[in-house]
Amino acid sequence: MTIKPSTSALDRQSAPALLRLEGITKRFGRMVAVEGVHFDVRAGEIHALLGENGAGKSTLMNCLFGLTQPDAGRILVNGKPVNITSPRRAQELGVGMVHQHFKLVPSMTVAENVFLGSEPHTGPFLRHRAADETVAQLAKTYGLDLRPGDRVGSLSVGAQQRVEILRALAKQVRVLILDEPTAVLTPVEAERFFAVIKGFAAQGLAIVLISHHLNEVRQVADRVTVLRRGRKVADAPIGTLTNRDLATLIIGEERPVLSEVSMGKPGQVRLDVAGLTLRNGKDLEILHGVDFTVSTGEIVGILGIAGNGQTELVEALTGLRRPSGGRVAINGIDVTGSDPGTIRRAGLGHIPEDRIGRGMAGYWTVKDNIAVGYLDTEEVGGRLLSNARITALVRRLMQKFDIRASSPEQLARRLSGGNAQKMVLARELSRQPSVVICAEPTRGLDIAATDFVRAELVAQRDAGAAVLLVSSEIEEVTRIADRILVISSGRVIARYEGRRPTEAEVGRSMLGEAA
Amino acid sequence: MTQPAAPVEATTTGRKPGDWLRAPGWRLLPMGLLQSIVAVVIGIVICLVIIFLIADDPLTAFRAFVLGTFSTTYAFGSMLAVATVLVLTALAAAVSFRAGAFNIGTEGQLVLGGLAAAVVAQNTGMGGIGQAAALIASALVGALWVAIPAWLRVRYRTNEILTTLMFNYIAADLALFLVNAYFRDPTSGAVETPPLDPTLWLPRLLRTSAANVGLLLVIGLAMGLWLLFERTRTGKRMEAAGLQPAFAEYLGIRSGSHLLLSLLGSGVLAGLAGGIAVLGITHAYTTGFSPQYGFLGITVALIGRLKPFGILLAALLYSSLITGATVMQSATDVPFSLVFILQGVLILLITSRRGGVA
């Protein structure tokens, strides 16, 4: 293979496929996850794979990475049919994958993580220096800003992702699969990330990019394949399709886009935060006196690049963390430093940032996950819980919140991201809390689920809830928030009231430029 | 904006290291019935292979091990009596495991509970009053014995698996000391309390065998616990706290009090198991009156998937194998210890998960 770094699009068209999947079909029980899908990627190409949650993207890639076996079809690497039985085999064949949820050991260094399981050694002794040097070299070659000796646990999410990528690259992969790589990144990190993967393609790697963000795909991909309900509905150079075309292909039919949301009509103050300060375990001040209020009938957006104190702010407001100073009141009740149960009873609904770890119990059924939010009511039974009442309640909410599960008894961990989030919403919002705090509510969700979540937040607002939306997505906040606070390094550095600012305007202030 | 905001990134933190360690309960809870059945079948097959390898007369040993329980009324009654105690120790394990606390100390709680029952029965009235007092005392002592590790767990986050396990050894020596120093039957050569008056014995169900009304009590308790687990708010909250502590915390469930409650409940059941074993089977506290009922109960709880009715079935199965092993030991040269091999194999198979680390 002799591909120069400056391969033109035309050359790529004629280049042989490095990897080809033919007629892949995979069923889970009666459900067909993927049916007869063809997919290929050439050296030097960035091929985007689009589709709603549950469209079959992950299943297809899991077949490719040896995490599951297809029921029909075949996989060819460099034109030769192969049988990929395990991720290790996939790596031997030159296929690497970077998962949305990192698989790193936080207490180990970058180099230790990269070489975990394949440490360079002389006899029984590890060659730490050789590992460090290799990592430093690889990082330099591929333009990844990493130091081999840093502990992974102390790195930012963006840097952890670079460790994951480096780990794949260290295995000499030719095909790199990136699953929702920007979901965890800040806008700046994402920009940097795109430059990096374009560099990979220029060096002759084949990149498969799984994403929900059309603009992002347009920015980096050469070609795009769209899956819908397990079938391929498009495979074309990105230039031949408009965003509107793509959206139609992904969703199936034209859906009314969440119309320009009207401004809320704020009333009485429901959530009152004054002078809130917070220290972390190392006695470092994370929040330096945050003040704001949220009133009934309005959505207040807190926008900031991830890691500027918003996670801790939400934890302090919801009782998961004890503030070191200041005052939090919900409906006039002082709940500063109270436990989460007390704050809930004061009228809080909380959609947590860590959906899988906090927002649900994956090994519980959908039914239990929803019913647990109703344990203090008669809706789940009298003195004893009533299965009939619980099932009726859950079925009603599943319908209202459009949770697509095979039955209320389905384990929550088997839900797609969008349905899992709708389950959390069903539990948290159906009781019409007077204060709703949600953090990154649409992270990792597909377009339809994102629209659903945002529409639901607006509906809550219009029904009189005071909604606090904490997000790092500029588009999300500027679209539905009535007031916006920009947070940076634990301080509110800008406030927008009475109008919706443009994305560029808040974007600049997020990055620390004068608003 | 070409320069990335470096200082901002420097303050960015990853996931807290603590979170990575906080997912205990699910390793045990949601596994399927099929795995239990397969595990039991494999375990029995391995036992049969061992019998075949070591026995002089494998066929007789086979028959005794598998069918010995059903050969005589006496053996069948012993099976029921052993099952009674195993159900209790297994329920004790289940109550704590479901709440994410691992009480491995049921053996110690049982031993001290048994001693308490023997002593209290001896020193209160005859008949029903003595029995009731003895059983209540055994339950209280069981709870007291687990209270120390439980308090250490809630207050100082001590690992309860280690503390409860170690408390077993302390309990064994403490019981030995107490019996020797204060409660020993002077007429006996063994370390045991004087035999109880027959009016204090739990009434028998099958004549000439050890099966006793404790069985009915235990079935009642299993039903009660089923209600607690499946039909009460407390049960659901406990399960959430055990399954996913971060989720429970977010929902406002006080994990600490549920943990404490479940450990104490576990101790009550384990202590009661000791009381029933003494009043129903041995009719005196004898050193070694428990052939590891506590540890066997953990196996039974796991085979029964921590569900009360699963535990009832698993206890019957397991105790029939134990009784079979006893019959086999007396009929052939294969020792009773085979049961402990079975236990080890079962625990390995039941706690294993497909594909290793998940």
Image: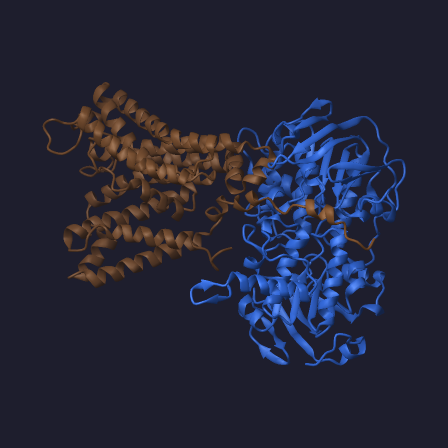
Chain colours: A blue, B brown
Single out the residue that lies furthest toward the top: B125
In this rendered view, identify the residue nearer to me: A257 or A356.
A356
Question: Against A359, is A210 above or below?
Answer: below
In this rendered view, identify the residue nearer to me: A314 or B305.
A314
Query: In which image quadrant can residue A386 be found?
Result: top right
Residue A61 at what x, y percent from top left?
A: 63, 65
Identify the image quadrant of the N terminus of chain A.
bottom right
Query: In which image quadrant can residue B80 be found?
Result: top left
Q: Does residue A119 appear in this view?
A: yes
Q: How many marks?
A: 0
Q: Is residue B326 left or right of residue A66?
A: left
- What residue is drawn where x is 65% and y is 63%? A139
Residue A426 at what x, y percent from top left?
A: 68, 41
In this rendered view, identify the residue nearer to me: B286 or B105.
B105
Single out the residue that lies furthest toward the right: A499
Residue A366 at what x, y percent from top left?
A: 60, 45
Q: Does residue A377 appear in this view?
A: no
Question: Against A376, is A224 above or below?
Answer: below
Q: Is residue A300 left or right of residue B82?
A: right
- What residue is drawn where x is 76% and y is 81%? A14
Identify the image quadrant of the C terminus of chain A.
top right
Q: Is residue B34 left or right of residue B14?
A: left
